[in-house]
Structures are given as C-alpha cells and as structure tokens.
Image: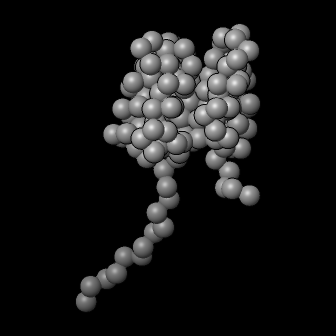
Amino acid sequence: MTRLQPILPVVPRRRIVVADDDPAFRGSLADAVRAHGFEVTVAASGMELVERVVYQGPFVALLADISMPWMNGLQAVRRLHAFGLALPAVMISALEDRELEAWVRCLGAQTVLLRKPFELPLLWRTLDDLLAPAR
C-alpha cells in the first residue's frame, strides 16, 4: 500500500532585487534585506536590473538607486513597465533634485522615493506598505 505524503501549502518566496552601482552600498543593503527575511538578487546597473526581473523573476519588489550608469533606476522601472512587469519599487537617491519626487510619482502609486541616508526601519515600513494587500 502506498503511503500518501501530506501536501504542504506553497509559500511564495519573498524575493527582492537590489540594484545599485556602488558595490559597498549594494552589498550592505542586500545583507540588511536578506536579514529581514527576503531572498535577494543583486544588480549593478539599470540594465542588469531589467535582465534580473525579466529572466530570474518573479520578484515581490525592487530597490533601485536612481543614479546608475548607462540606464538609471527610473529608466529601468519604465522599461519594466513597458514589458508589463510593474513591481512595487523603492527608488533610492542621494540627489537633492526637487523634481525627483515628481519623476518617481510618474511611475505609479506602487513606486516611492527614499532619500539617502535613510534608517532601515523606514525602509521596512515602506516595504510593508507597498507589499500590503490592497485594502
């Protein structure tokens, strides 16, 4: 007689892409996000961010620096939207440009701006808000 194994519920993995061209910041942020319970994939540029999401997804969210060479974070998120891959996104920047908030708002309600430096509790609250089920 064959013994049946219980079927365990499939728990979706909480995967996030962290994109920043600064290896030290990218590594530190990835380590913090990992310690907070997420699986992390990293990217060193906007183009790598797009490639990771397209070829290694699905992901629940992305964290991306705005200022990256070749394709910045804003351009990468726009490219993902064009592919039909709109993810909750936290755009990160140390730039003082006042127009950044408007550019980020143009990417939709699921995209927010965090200015460097920021405290990790603010990042966790931001992610919780973005990933909360629609009310």
Question: Taking 70 as reference, is 88 left or right?
Answer: right
Residue 77 in the image, given as x and y percentages of width and height = 51, 31
Q: Residue at x 64, y 32 (%)?
A: 106
**Do we see residue 27 in this rendering?**
no
Q: Nearer the viewer, residue 54 or 41?
A: 54
Say above or below: 124 vs 44.
below
Question: Taking 53 as reference, is 72 left or right?
Answer: right
Residue 27 in the image, given as x and y percentages of width and height = 50, 20
Q: Residue furthest left?
A: 1
Q: Residue at x 71, y 44 (%)?
A: 129
Q: Residue at x 56, y 20 (%)?
A: 65
Residue 55 in the image, given as x and y percentages of width and height = 33, 39
In this figure, which colouring scheme has been used for the structure?
one colour
Q: Nearer the viewer, residue 36 or 132?
A: 132
Q: Nearer the viewer, residue 70 or 35?
A: 70
Residue 108 in the image, given as x and y percentages of width and height = 64, 38
**Do we see residue 122 in this rendering?**
yes
Say above or below: 106 vs 61.
above
